[in-house]
Amino acid sequence: MSSSTTSITAAIAGFANIPSRAIGATARDVARLSLLDWLAVALAGLDEPVSAHLRALAAEEAGTPQATLFGHAAKVPARMAALGNGALSHALDYDDTHFAYVGHPSVAVFPAALAMAERTDASAAAFLDAALIGMEAACRIGAWLGTRHYNHGFHQTATSGAFGATVAAGRLAGLSGPQMQHALGLAATRASGLKSQFGTMGKPFNAGIATANGVEAALLGGRDFVSRPDGLECLQGFADTHQGEAGDPAAALAGIGQTWLFENVQHKFHACCHGLHAMLEALALLRGEGLAAEAVERVTISTNPRWLKVCNITAPRTGLEAKFSYRLTAAMALAGKSTAALDSYTEQTCADPVLVQLAERVTVAADAAVGDTATRVVVETRDGRRLAADFDLDRPLPLAVRREKIIAKLGALVPAAASDLVRLDSALGTLSARELAARVGLHAVRRQSC
Amino acid sequence: MSSSTTSITAAIAGFANIPSRAIGATARDVARLSLLDWLAVALAGLDEPVSAHLRALAAEEAGTPQATLFGHAAKVPARMAALGNGALSHALDYDDTHFAYVGHPSVAVFPAALAMAERTDASAAAFLDAALIGMEAACRIGAWLGTRHYNHGFHQTATSGAFGATVAAGRLAGLSGPQMQHALGLAATRASGLKSQFGTMGKPFNAGIATANGVEAALLGGRDFVSRPDGLECLQGFADTHQGEAGDPAAALAGIGQTWLFENVQHKFHACCHGLHAMLEALALLRGEGLAAEAVERVTISTNPRWLKVCNITAPRTGLEAKFSYRLTAAMALAGKSTAALDSYTEQTCADPVLVQLAERVTVAADAAVGDTATRVVVETRDGRRLAADFDLDRPLPLAVRREKIIAKLGALVPAAASDLVRLDSALGTLSARELAARVGLHAVRRQSC
């Protein structure tokens, strides 16, 4: 634990109530991108078994119609809406990631913010600002807890996420500074979530835990519930008990409210293993320069050796195997078949003769000089040209490019809803959170009744 | 982690469904004592602020009338009833304790069992058996996690308690063995609760967390929710991430179903932290030998080091803090102020100059040679005498004596309800869980309307 006297719990509670006008335009624009992305992955995840289980729990419990649970006909209490929407939006593992947080900001925070915004009849703009502030808090706390916390086995989406969800929900519930500190203290005793659940429904459920914990802490905090106002940093508090690195809080909080860690959030644009994404982006660059599939003689992919054990199935036969194949996804990208759409990854795709022949022209080479997040692609063409492209996922993309890519992802993931989601985003300043949730809810019900 | 191949998660899941006829008569009799004790502390705790906060949350959420939340007019969903009853019955810190578990079995398990028994319309006898089996599971898992888990900062009532609550609720919900394993796996990612909340409403809330987590895990487990079926013992599972000692599971499970650790549960006869009781009994021995407060020059309390982080608030200012103070409760005992009466623990008591001066004569010393359940008291008198007394809570009392003391406690705590609670206990074999809850609920409403 740090010997500094800065209370990170108190500082985060103070940050939670900064005026909306203090929020940077870029941070808000990036939050809007994450909102679009989150709505798309939520709608696309509705039919997953974990989503159905949580809707069944909601149907059994029923209760005051406060907030929208996507895919569920009736509104439900805010805490239940948050639990369900957190789980269903993480079900596909296609949501955003923040590497400083070591977690997925959207799925842990947006559901709490939306449920509380509906409950309190806030504007959509206030909802977005609260979510952004909550996601920034989750990133700051996540970075402060550090990778030791993650590596020890805690699913940071769920743990740091619970604090971010508390901030977002607490802001919308109008908590005072002291109330917010106690709400964060409650989150400190309630936060949980283990990485050993990966590969089970427990993983998306962990996102639901985070967001439901945030709503609960905010509701109780608003009633002057007394917990530890220093619950994050106190002796045997959250960091101390959960292997938090808990370095200098002043460093963790540096520039908070002026600089936004959240801006570096990464969105997923391909519905496959993250190890393939840099290659797919490099190939997209070459296609953008006019490369056609027919012109390809030979493709060489240079990637960090660690990925060869992760996603180098040379001749995939199932949709799941396709998601872990450099050769097949390279062929898909070259042939213009969407790597963003979930239904691109099928047995039919694996057997498609055009793709199979293209895949046979692809060689994958290990190169320790290539970074973890990068890939180098060299294409030799039939007419003797040699085209090369590099891509590093860590390289920041201009906002307009990110937005374009997210809109393309919407089209691939939820084609029937995509244009309406973009319209909703444009109208965000004029909508209430309830109107926003209701419009998205309509798409959910439409998908469910297909 | 142990290298044994016994899965403690699987073994506990198997134990959860033993036939009722396999339960030992003594274990069941002790469970009945704990039920009486639990009902009394629940009724007595209804007016605590934490209880009011959780009833307000229940009123806001409403929902399907499945189970009784004491003091609340309408029935609520089982998960909410469990959350509220767990918190309100632990609010006074007057409930039972098990030292192998290192926690409070009743408040973590009875609320889950009662809520699920009402939901499924089980008999009161089936409710009692499920609760006993859940409490035994909590004791076994608590002992397996060990004191390292507790000393690291985890509130074992909440953590081991969540698994016990899952067992009890899952048994009543009719979970199969595999479903029970997955429910325990869900509890593994959901269980939480920190000791740093002691002295705040977060402490009783932790009991509510345990019991609500158990009901939730049982409800989802019954829907074939897939989590980790080895969630307690797997790599980065609950024990591994939460500083569990996790010794040989075969030893932890030895004789389970034949011998009942639960039988050694301790009931409280002082309305403060259990860590203080051995000292209070030792001081009572000295007072019985004629020691007067005026004679005291200096008091030295020797206690196991672990208690210093639990109940050693040196200068308490609130009634709640007083319940965690060796020095003040020692002063109360020396001055003949009742430590059994709830209304002894007030701001006035903390500020009473006679008590404050006496408290200043008390020194608390850590002594690792003193057992967890014992305390040694040495009093030096103004006239130069040196009086010593030891007390160990683990000294077994005959069942009839325990029952007598509990009935006396009922009379002191809830005089208007005491005789009816004893009648209910006698009629347990003929009642449904709903009838039992309704009868207790009537007393709760009567108290509330006073």
Image (cartoon, coloured by chain):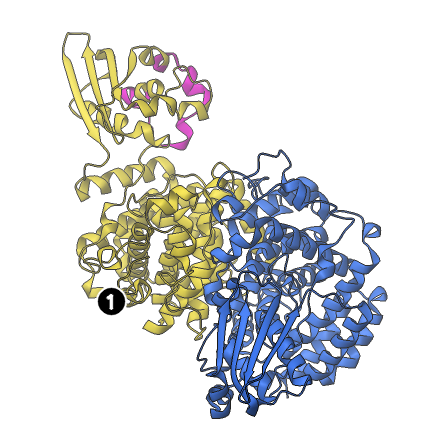
Chain colours: A yellow, B blue
For label 1, the SS is: loop
Q: Residue A187 at what x, y percent from top left?
A: 43, 61
Residue B414 is left or right of residue B211, and the answer is right
Residue matched to label 1:
A18
Image point 19% across, 19% down: which residue? A291
Residue A298 is left or right of residue A167, and the answer is left
Residue B218 is left or right of residue B26, and the answer is left
Residue B431 appears in the picture as rendered? yes
Q: Is residue B182 above or below residue B60?
A: above
Image point 49% across, 49% down: which residue? B243
Out of B205 and A323, give the one closest to the viewer.
Answer: B205
Image point 77% across, 71% down: which residue? B402
Mark 1 chain? A
Callout 1, which amino acid? Answer: Ile
Q: Quadrant of the N terminus of chain B?
A: top right
Q: Is residue A419 above or below residue B156?
A: above
Q: Is residue A336 magenta?
A: yes
Out of A416 and B296, give the one closest to the viewer.
Answer: B296
Most extreme residue toward the front is B384
Q: Residue A46 at what x, y percent from top left?
A: 47, 44
Q: Main secondary structure of the magenta part?
A: helix
Out of A448 and A387, give the one closest to the viewer.
Answer: A387
Q: Which residues are magenta?
A: A332-355
Q: Is residue A65 above or below residue A96?
A: below
